[in-house]
Amino acid sequence: MSIDTPSKPQRGPSILVQSVEGVGQGLIGFVSNIGGVMSLLVDVVRWSLRRPLRLQNLFAQLDFVGVGSIFIVALTGLFTGMVFAFQSSTAFELFDAESLVGPTVALTLTRELAPVFSALMITMRAGSAMCTELGTMRVTEQVDALETMAVNPVQYLLVPRIQAGLFMTPALTMLFNTAGMGGAYVVSVVVKGISAGTFISRTRQWMDPMDVWEGIIKGAIFGLSVALICCYKGYNASGGAKGVGQATTEAMVSSALSIFILDFIVGVLMH
Amino acid sequence: MSDSNSTASAKPMIDIVDLHKTFGEHRVLTGINLTVPAGSTCVILGGSGSGKTVLMKHMIGLLKPDSGQVIIDGEDIVPVGVEELQRVRRKFGMVFQAAALFDSMTVYENVAFPLREHTRLPEEQIREKVRAKLDLMGLKREAEQKFPADLSGGMRKRVGLARAIVLDPKVVLYDEPTTGLDPITTDYVDEMILAAQRELGVTSVVISHDIASAFNVADQIAFLSKGVIVEHGPPEQLRASEHPAVKVFLQTWFGKN
């Protein structure tokens, strides 16, 4: 065979094999991530029961996650309520059912939109910061430094952040509800001319405290999940600035997905 | 508080016996034996990837070995649990390569951190102790309220050492303390290591690939190559070593003759 004869090109695995491999890899990653997050949850519960309680760190995180997110969550809630009231009243007008705008907005907000949107806003604002801060501390050996100083990093860094997510997301969900209903009221009553009495009485007629509770429970579950995922990704980051960036991207995507998946699961379980 | 200021004796502070550690397929430590007498300075010298950092992480319990013993101050720390390890770690101070200062805290808060975590001292006494250590490291008062991001590399190292010694530990571990520093700052860091030993009587373990600095500060040098210690003794013994790995390494500094 002469040297110039082009050799048969080496064929890699077929597209089918590659895509099956891709799905498999993704699945393995997904399962191992769930395992990692669950074992972190066990660690967090264990360390949150031990002294010292580190209230100062907890309050700092409650302030950062909760108080710091008030404006952005209220604004999101206000506009969500306004848009939703506007669109639904336009639709309900077609068959003279404007009186249902109030309850429609209220039920959807309390059960679904408030916990989901609040958790998404907290993911973006506080979750990303948690992940990058912990990731940077990990890659600059600050986490190791804590450990060598006989301070448990899970207790010192993670427990307060995860508790803050757990406690503040339901609180912000309530704020979202309030702002959303305020916005819906203004649009329905002031802009669309629905009578205030109808709006309020119909809403009270259709709403049940359980609807609000559903949102609060969802908020707590989402908040816990988001904080756990963001802390897990940041705490286990490696490979310098690039690694921290990658961990943050993964944390954002996984957190958002977890919100939607858990929303479905909790929704089904509660009805 | 620890009694680290007692006079140095020949009793071993760190005794490592037949230590093995493998990461996956990679055998990093393959039978380390090392004794560091109390109050002395031991430099672990070796090239990149020789397992120096892994060895140091075993000393403070950040890594568990596959087999072997790590005896600190008479106590084997390999089988102990998390809680016990916390107690053992209070005997240590560690200076990290890039200082690893908490960047959300000021210099003062960084140095005060171990005191606030592990003692119930009133704030005046904390201030006194922090200032004493900062003075020992030659840091001025105005540096106290600065954040780590505003400090030079050398200053960060000094704050890192001040933080490591603020609880008067028995052992101070230095992870490549002179890497990335200019020759004058390197000299200064060497002086700092000697000062900490002289003033506080601590046992020091320095991991380094900086030959000049090693010969400056060491009472004894252990040369690590391919996961084992191939030479261990006073600097002059290392200088006279016939081991090929040691000879090649030292030739880079002392020249071929």
Image (cartoon, helix red, strand yellow):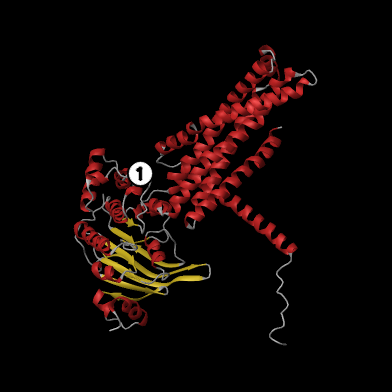
Q: Where is residue B243? Give x, y as percent.
A: 34, 82
Q: Which residue lies furthest to the bottom in this view?
A: A1
Relative to B44, say whether A91 is above or below. Answer: above
User: What's the chain of the residue with tag 1?
Assistant: B
Q: Can residue A60 be seen in this view?
A: yes
> Quarter holding the C terminus of chain B?
bottom left
Answer left or right for B116 relative to A95: left
Q: Position of residue B252 (x, y in %)?
A: 33, 77
Residue furthest toward the front? A4
Residue B72: which quarter of the image? bottom left
Res. A218 visible in picture = no
* Quarter of image, res B79: bottom left
Q: Residues within 10 Å of mark 1 (few under 14, many from 20)?
A: some
Relative depth, front residue between B25 and B45? B45
Expressed as whole percent of the image width and height from the top left, the position of residue A65 reads 49, 36
Location of residue B163 with respect to A83 vertically, above or below: below
| Count of numbered badges drawn on the protein | 1
**Percent coordinates x, y for residue A6 in the rendering:** 71, 80
Assign a secondary structure to mark 1. loop
The residue that mark 1 highlights is B105
Q: Between A11 and A141, which is closer to the camera in this rendering?
A: A11
Amino acid type for the residue under numbered disc 1 = Met
**Residue at 69%, 33% in the rendered image:** A270
Q: In this view, does A179 lie to the left or right of A135?
A: right
Answer above or below: position of B236 versus A97.
below
Q: Which residue corresponds to the image point at 54% horizontal and 32% vertical from the top-left?
A: A72
